Image (cartoon, rainbow, N blue to C red):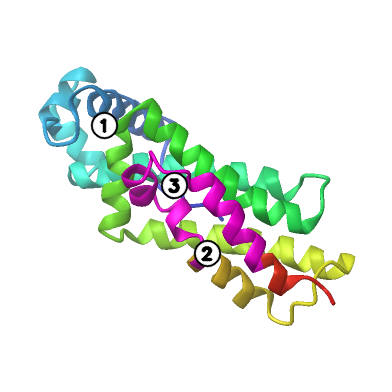
């Protein structure tokens, strides 16, 4: 399962190609002009199509933002899955999970603040796909904790609850809004400290 749920299996190859073309044009516009100064007519013009045709695929600008943001979040999920496969201890993988997620969002913010604005908007307004994304991350954390139990690193009776607590405790380092707002602070070092405390509670006696 992934947060990227913008394409229907029933869509034709042409429809998929057209949607991708619209999203690429919109993302370029958002990066250059920002969300507020971009219109559906602008996006349609960049795609050399009528704005009525754009509305066939997206109800409004907000739908386009959702699709772009969901695509970015899917990339961050891939980063976390890669961390879960690393040949290091489960304890280290949990820490690296949070650090890599933080680093990814910090890089995206530094690369294009105007485009990153879309991710902050989606998070602030609680779009449904944000919940799906958080569930995906929760599942990956559970897998790492269960592996830690199997290896004798942890004695966690409820891996799901433990994963939920980790997400709550580290939201400051992974929430797009916090990463942008506190970008000048040593958040990575703070994340290391928080994880050190959390992992102390998971470690086997």
Residue 63 visible to the viewer = yes
Counting residues from the N terminus, which is met first, the one under dot 3 or under dot 1? 3
The residue tagged 1 is 114
- For image coordinates 34% across by 33% down, the residue present is 19
How crowded pointer 1 is (Cα within 10 Å; few <14, some 14-19, many 20+) is rated as some
Residue 167's disc is 2
Residue located at (25% from left, 58% from top): 125
Q: Residue 10 carries which label?
A: 3
Could you say which quadrant of the image residue 40 lies in? top left
Q: Counting residues from the N terminus, which is met first, the one under dot 2 or under dot 3? A: 3
Residue range in magenta is: 169-198
**Is 165 situated above or below 8?**
below
Image height of 97 relative to 171, above or below: above
Quadrant where the image shows the N terminus:
bottom right
| Residue 46 x/y as whole percent | 21, 18
Callout 2 crowding tier (Cα within 10 Å): few <14, some 14–19, many ≥20: some
How far is mark 2 from mark 1, CA to CA? 26 Å
205 left or right, relative to 101: right
Q: How far apart are marks 3 and 1 (CA)?
A: 33 Å
Residue at coordinates 41% horizontally, 42% vertically from top-left?
Answer: 11
Write down the quadrant of residue 158 in the picture: bottom right
């Amino acid at each position: 399962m992934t947060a990227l749920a913008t394409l229907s299996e029933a869509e034709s190859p042409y429809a998929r190609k057209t949607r991708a073309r619209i999203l690429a044009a919109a993302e370029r516009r958002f990066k250059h002009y920002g969300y507020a100064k971009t219109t559906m007519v602008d996006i349609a013009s960049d795609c050399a199509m009528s704005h009525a045709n754009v509305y066939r695929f997206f109800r409004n600008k907000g739908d386009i933002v959702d699709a772009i943001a969901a695509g970015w979040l899917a990339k961050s999920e891939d980063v976390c899955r890669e961390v879960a496969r690393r040949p290091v201890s489960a304890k280290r993988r949990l820490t690296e999970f949070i650090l890599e997620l933080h680093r990814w969002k910090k890089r995206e913010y530094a690369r294009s603040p105007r485009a990153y604005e879309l991710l902050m908007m989606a998070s602030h307004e609680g779009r449904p796909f944000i919940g799906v994304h958080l569930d995906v991350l929760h599942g990956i954390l559970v897998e790492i904790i269960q592996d830690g139990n199997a290896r004798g690193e942890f004695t966690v009776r409820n891996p799901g609850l433990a994963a939920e607590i980790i997400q709550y405790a580290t939201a400051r380092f992974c929430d797009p809004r916090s990463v942008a707002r506190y970008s000048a602070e040593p958040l990575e070092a703070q994340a290391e400290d928080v994880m050190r405390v959390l992992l102390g509670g998971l470690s086997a006696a």
